[in-house]
Image (spheres, rainbow, N blue to C red):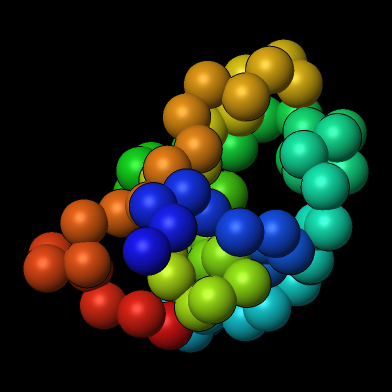
């Protein structure tokens, strides 16, 4: 089994409490340039996001100043898929 997120990566943004699909990124470069700053673990702010890979798995994603800091699958025992 592949334990790395698979492209394309789909980003969901919160809209009035619901998760709404906004963008899909097909490569790492697209993801970095398109988001610049992102963190799936910061859910308490206005810019809360969720990231899902091509297989529908939730991922931990953190990007700072166009640098990929974290890109891994979330623990499926604690996370619910979108």
Q: Position of residue 45 (x, y in %)?
A: 44, 46
- Say which quarter of the image contains residue 15: bottom right
- Say which quarter of the image contains residue 74: bottom left
Residue reaching furthest to the front: 1
Count how many numbered circles sit on residues in the image.
Answer: 0
Query: Relative to 64, is 2 on the left or the right?
Result: left
Depth order, front residue of 34/2: 2
Q: Is residue 43 visible?
A: no
Query: Relative to 65, is 53 on the left or the right?
Result: left
Residue reaching furthest to the left: 77
Tell me the residue at 59%/37% (across/down).
Answer: 38
Query: Relative to 2, is 37 on the left or the right?
Result: right
Tell me the residue at 52%/54% (across/down).
Answer: 5
Query: Relative to 80, is 26 on the left or the right?
Result: right
Indicate the quadrant containing the C terminus: top left, top right, bottom left or bottom right: bottom left
Q: Is residue 61 visible?
A: yes
Indicate the quadrant containing the N terminus: top left, top right, bottom left or bottom right: bottom left
Q: Position of residue 46 (x, y in %)?
A: 53, 51
- Say which quarter of the image contains residue 78: bottom left
Q: Is residue 64 above or below residue 37?
A: above
Depth order, front residue of 19/9: 9
Q: Position of residue 69 (x, y in %)?
A: 52, 21
Q: Position of residue 66 (x, y in %)?
A: 76, 21
Q: Is residue 18 above or below residue 24?
A: below
Tell me the residue at 87%/43% (across/down).
Answer: 30
Depth order, front residue of 57/15: 57
């Amino acid at each position: 089994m592949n334990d790395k997120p698979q492209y394309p990566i789909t980003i969901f943004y919160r809209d009035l409490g619901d998760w709404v699909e906004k963008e899909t990124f097909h490569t790492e470069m697209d993801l970095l340039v398109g988001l610049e700053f992102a963190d799936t673990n910061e859910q308490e702010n206005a810019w809360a996001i969720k990231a899902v890979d091509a297989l529908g798995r939730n991922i931990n994603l953190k990007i700072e100043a166009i640098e990929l800091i974290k890109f891994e699958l979330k623990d499926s025992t604690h996370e619910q898929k979108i």
